[in-house]
Image: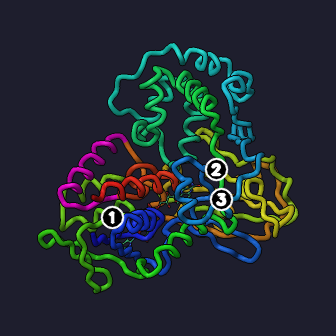
Amino acid sequence: MRVVIVGGGIGGMATALALADRGHEVRVLESEQTAGGKVGTLRLGPWQVETGPFAILQRASTEPWLRRLKLESSVVKADAAAKHRFIVKDRQLAAVPTSPPALLTSKALSWRAKLAILREPFLPRGKSEDETVAAFARRRLGLEIAENFVCPFVTGVFAGDYEQLSLRSAFPTLAQLEREHGSLLRGLYAQQKERQRRGELPPDLISFAGGMGDLTHALATELGDRLTVAAAVSSIAKNGNCFVVIANGARFEADRVVLALPAQAASLLLRSLDENMASAFSEIPAVDVAAISLGYSGAGSAVPSGFGFLVPRCEPFSMLGTLFVSGTFPQPSLPDALHLRVLVGGSKDPEALSLSDQALVGRAESELASILGRLPPRTFVHVQRWRGAIAQYTVGHHRRMELIEERGRGLQLYSTGASLRGVGVNDVLADATAIAAKFQ
Ligand SMILES: Cc1cc2nc3c(=O)[nH]c(=O)nc-3n(C[C@H](O)[C@H](O)[C@H](O)COP(=O)(O)OP(=O)(O)OC[C@H]3O[C@@H](n4cnc5c(N)ncnc54)[C@H](O)[C@@H]3O)c2cc1C
């Protein structure tokens, strides 16, 4: 089949490659000058900066992609210290407990919160068809754990508001644990036992020798001239069984089309093809995020070893959190340097991107000084802005997905990418595999 894939982010390119491997004739159309979408790595002097994703978990479903892209030998595992994570509590860093026993002895939790944990396995299952992550967290774990741990955890993945996000769509595994085991903790325990029985280790957190951009670079290389950049698709029409896709005045014919676009871009293209599908896409919001990279030479030990910290909403800081880049993936070219990545914006601070770079950096550094103490003079800075950075799977997302899938089947038009069935790179890669398998 001739398939046109609209959008050359990691989702579009991975879907195209999976389809090509099944013998289909593919053409990826990407509007920007370079493919990759939000995934990319910049080299600015000795500093390596990720434009979007910073790391992924090496899950079983990701392995075939690493093999296919010949990236196994360039995998870089995160430093062992990255298992230490922090939250801000009372304006200071507090270690996040990493196991149920550690939860019960943690100083970051009151005795009331510890009682809530002990009570959780005995609570009844929820009855709601689709509830918010906040409602679920309060119901099962109580207010304190919801506000201080679950809320920042949600921020870490979606930069979103846990009062709006749907548990079943945004965190399907948690919903499944409750459904199947009647309790989150019993479910997690059963999952851990099963992993031990199978001799499986928890997945490693990884990046690549040249950064996350290695992934999209390898995909673009594999696709070769089947990828066209600087080709913004302006319309898709159907003529009988044949699609006609127009990009920068050029016309492409296809038997099938795959949209691998942010939801709002997909909605615009679908207006003339299917109004209902276009509306469903338009109801998938996304938040803006900026990533501020800050470098300090010779200050490697100025922060505790670990992955970084998240900031609960009740703390008086605007940032979402900060990654300790140099502690997670130490760069041999920058021994003893401190590299931090401050994330701002999201639903917590929706106006953040209206600030100038200078204002964003000034505010980030003043908040870092309150939380971490005084840092030495900065030697490097870079600000990366993303409008519509991360899709928000709000309550009702599964209904919108049902409609998008049903209408798509009728049209022979498929949709993939981070706006739909998982916002992380792993989810997007797994969805690419699943979409390609649907083509007969
Ligand atoms: C700041 C940030 C940090 C993140 N951190 C992580 C992380 O650590 N780990 C993780 O797993 N995930 C992370 N993510 C999520 C990850 O970036 C996404 O899962 C992934 O990049 C989504 O890929 P995609 O192909 O679906 O979308 P995109 O990357 O948005 O690609 C869509 C493509 O479509 C193109 N396009 C748009 N309109 C048109 C048109 N009309 N015609 C042709 N092309 C068009 C765009 O130019 C773009 O290239 C992060 C995201 C952000 C923003």
Q: Report which residue position mark 3 lands on.
A: 207
Looking at the rendered structure, the secondary structure element under dot 3 is strand
Disc 1 under 8 Å from ligand 1? The reply is no
Magenta span of residues = 395-415
Q: Earlier in the sequence, mark 2 or mark 3?
A: 3
How far separated are the C-alphas under marks 2 and 1?
32 Å
Mark 3 is surrounded, within 10 Å at the Cα level, by few (under 14), some (14 to 19) or many (20 or more) other residues, namely many
Q: Give percent across and percent down for residue 217.
A: 56, 72
Q: Nearer the viewer, mark 2 or mark 1?
A: 1
Type of amino acid under label 2: Gly
Query: Where the C terminus falls, by quadrant?
Result: bottom left
The way the protein has been coloured in the rendering is rainbow
Residue 239 sits in quarter = bottom left
Left or right for 176, reference 247: right
Can you tell which mark lies on residue 321? Answer: 2
Residue occupied by mark 1: 259
Residue 180 in the image: above or below residue 66: above
- Residue 360 visible in image: no
Relative to 419, 346 lies left or right: right
In the displayed orientation, state which residue is furthest to the front: 23
Marked residue nearer the N-terminal end (2 or 1): 1
Instruction: Tell which circle, 1 or 3, labels the residue nearer the N-terminal end.
Output: 3
**What is the three-letter code of the residue carrying label 1?**
Leu
Foreground of the two, 322 or 375:
322
Mark 1 closeness class: few <14, some 14–19, many ≥20 residues within 10 Å: many
The residue under the point 88% across, 63% down is 298
Mark 1 and mark 3: span between their CA atoms? Answer: 27 Å
